[in-house]
Amino acid sequence: MLREMTVNFLGVTLVALALLLVNQVGAVLARAAQLQYQKGFVLELIGLGAAQNVAILLPFGLLLGIVLAFGRLYHDSEMAAAQACGVGVGRVAVAVWLLALPVTGLIAWLNFDLSPRAATAEANMRNEALRAAAAAPLEPGTFRSFGGGHIVVYARGAQSNGDLTDVFVRRSEGSALETTVARRAHYAVSGDGESESITLYDGERVEGTPGNNRYRVMRFEQQLIPVRSPQTAARAQRLDEMSTLSLIGSHDPKLIAELQWRVGLPLMTLVLTVLAVPLGRLRPRQGRFAHVWIALLIFALYAMLALAGRTWLSRGTVPNALGLWWVHGIFLVAGLAAMMGPTLLRLPRTRSHQ
């Protein structure tokens, strides 16, 4: 039974992790294309982003793994045979918790320690990627954007000393558009890496507004274009970057919500384990996947209620004492009721006599 649950848990988790990585790759590549990240940063950013979100996949994988394992055992009559041979509720519970407790411990470590460190490392790496992108030399034959896309530069070729030839520059400010062409350009970065400039030689600039016939043409021998670097200055620490110890004892609703969210994921895993056992039971002639959709629905409701409760708690809508415990309490009571249901139905009923 333990082997069956473990195999299904690993299979579901790996599939969910693959979907997470596909989504993470798309998000990182979109940001890298927009902010001109260098290639060396992309893979590390994908890994750090996935490390922050993998904890939420494990409760999902555990719930479906247990439901799928019990579904196969009931469908193939192996559970009926085991119960006929004397396998009781205690031995079944031991197999379930032998898997659930290590997974819960792993989730606690991920949520309490690894995720905050990964969030901090990702934020620092993004700043480093922005600085590296700003300091990278312009390459001929490729478009390069600066200032959040307000400046676009293209050069057809490059000289041996690094200067660019046949340069095109487009600058936009509101509705105004400015296009410049020059025979040669020199790109320079300040010593501290905080600012850049492009010096154009022997060119022509056209200024105007699209749709308006009024425009101005200016020829020049030399023109300096300052480029504003992306903001990499000191920033406020995000909640997900704060260590778990720094959240303990705080009276700030936002910090309390973050702490209870971190505690809530391991607790959610234990509650879902309680729910998974009755969900895995099948009646005769039911398909092995009959209760999978119910498990998916329960997990979605649980996760959405927890996220909503986190938002309400951070805004002060829910009292700090109530926190997120009410969400876990609802599903724990439902799980215990589902587990005790067959037992209660088998209890002898007293008959009234007139």
Image (cartoon, grey):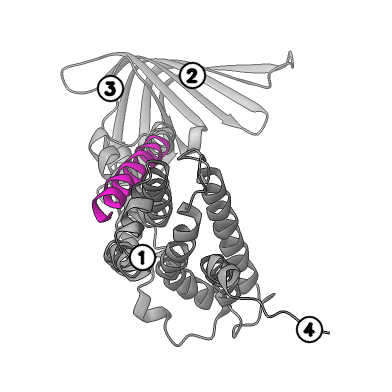
18 left or right of 342? Answer: left
Chain part drawn in magenta: 1-24
Task: Report x, y in % for residue 275.
Answer: 49, 62
Q: How many marks?
A: 4
Circle nearer the N terminus (1, 3): 1
Q: Which mark is residue 353?
A: 4
Q: CA distance from mark 3 to mark 2?
A: 18 Å
Q: Could you tell me if the residues under marks 2 and 1 are in contact, i.e. CB atoms within 8 Å?
A: no
Residue type, label 3: Glu
Point out the image quarter for the C terminus: bottom right
In the picture of the structure, the residue carrying the numbered disc 3 is: 139
Up-down relation of residue 185 to residue 197 (above or below):
above
Q: Which mark is residue 111?
A: 1
Label 4 SS: loop
157 left or right of 58? Answer: left
Task: Report x, y in % for residue 201.
Answer: 36, 20
Of badges 3 and 4, nearer the viewer stands: 4
256 left or right of 76? Answer: right
Q: Which mark is residue 55?
A: none
| Residue 127 seen anywhere in this rendered image of the structure | no
Residue at image location 29% in from the left, 57% down from the top = 121
Of badges 4 and 1, nearer the viewer stands: 4
Task: Report x, y in % for residue 31.
Answer: 42, 38
Q: Could you tell me if the residues under marks 1 and 3 are in contact, i.e. CB atoms within 8 Å?
A: no
Q: Is residue 208 magenta?
A: no
Of badges 2 and 1, nearer the viewer stands: 1
Of badges 2 and 4, nearer the viewer stands: 4
